[in-house]
Image (cartoon, rainbow, N blue to C red):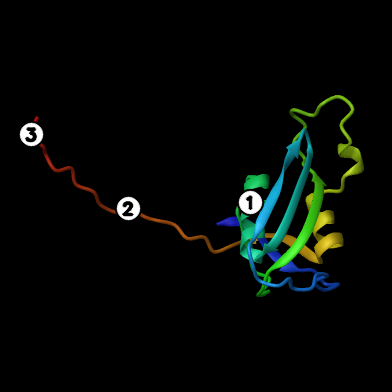
């Protein structure tokens, strides 16, 4: 399926692994500006959170093991719901934020996605 692959950028990954332990995330959007703070989070969960905020399929293809702490801030491309006085113009795109903060990149391509296919179904009559 067409989506995004989360990859290590050419400049290299910028974070050091955190000690394993209890993980947490906090974030969301205020108009067009998104924030995401994570403690002890693995790359597949980052990919999931990015997919949720972007409304696109994002698959972790970094090959990075371990957990990491990070803070991201970016502006979405969605112009709806931008409050007056929004500082979206001061926030970078998600692509720039990932590369400058984490050393990661999103590449649009065909990505593997788990799907369930129902190829046959029968309805069993029930008595009323």
**In the displayed structure, would residue 55 be above or below residue 32?**
below
Q: Which residue is mark 1?
A: 51
SS at circle 2: loop
Q: Position of residue 8 (x, y in %)?
A: 75, 70
In the drawing, what numbered circle is on residue 127?
3
What separation in Å lies between label 2 and label 1 (alpha carbons)? 25 Å
**In the displayed structure, would residue 91 be above or below residue 25?**
above
Q: Label 1: how many residues lie within 10 Å, few (<14), some (14-19) or many (20+)?
A: some
In the drawing, what numbered circle is on residue 18?
none
Residue found at the far front of this picture? 22
Of tags 2 and 1, the one toward the viewer is 1
Q: Label 3: how many residues lie within 10 Å, few (<14), some (14-19) or many (20+)?
A: few
* Quadrant, the C terminus: top left
What separation in Å lies between label 2 and label 3 (alpha carbons)? 26 Å
Q: Position of residue 63 (x, y in %)?
A: 66, 75
Q: Position of residue 84 (x, y in %)?
A: 86, 24
Question: Which quadrant holds residue 65?
Answer: bottom right
What separation in Å lies between label 3 and label 1 (alpha carbons)? 44 Å
Q: Nearer the viewer, residue 1 or 90?
A: 90
SS at circle 1: helix
Q: Which residue is mark 2?
A: 118
Q: Which residue is at 77% across, 40% downward?
A: 77
Of tags 2 and 3, the one toward the viewer is 3
SS at circle 3: loop
**In the displayed structure, would residue 66 be above or below residue 113?**
below
Q: Nearer the viewer, residue 66 or 102?
A: 66
Question: Which quadrant holds residue 78?
Answer: top right
Q: Mark 2 or mark 1, which has the lower sequence index?
A: 1
Q: Position of residue 29 (x, y in %)?
A: 74, 39
């Amino acid at each position: 399926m067409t989506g995004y692959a989360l990859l290590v950028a050419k400049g290299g990954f910028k974070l050091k692994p955190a000690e394993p332990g209890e993980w947490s995330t906090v974030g969301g959007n205020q108009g067009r500006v998104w924030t995401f703070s994570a403690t002890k989070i693995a790359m597949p969960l980052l990919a999931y959170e990015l997919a949720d905020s972007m409304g696109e399929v994002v698959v972790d293809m970094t090959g990075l093991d371990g957990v990491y702490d990070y803070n991201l801030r970016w502006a979405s491309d969605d112009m709806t719901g931008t409050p007056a006085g929004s500082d979206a113009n001061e926030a970078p795109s998600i692509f720039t934020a990932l590369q400058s903060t984490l050393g990661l990149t999103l590449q649009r391509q065909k990505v593997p996605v788990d799907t369930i296919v129902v190829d046959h179904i029968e309805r069993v009559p029930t008595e009323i």
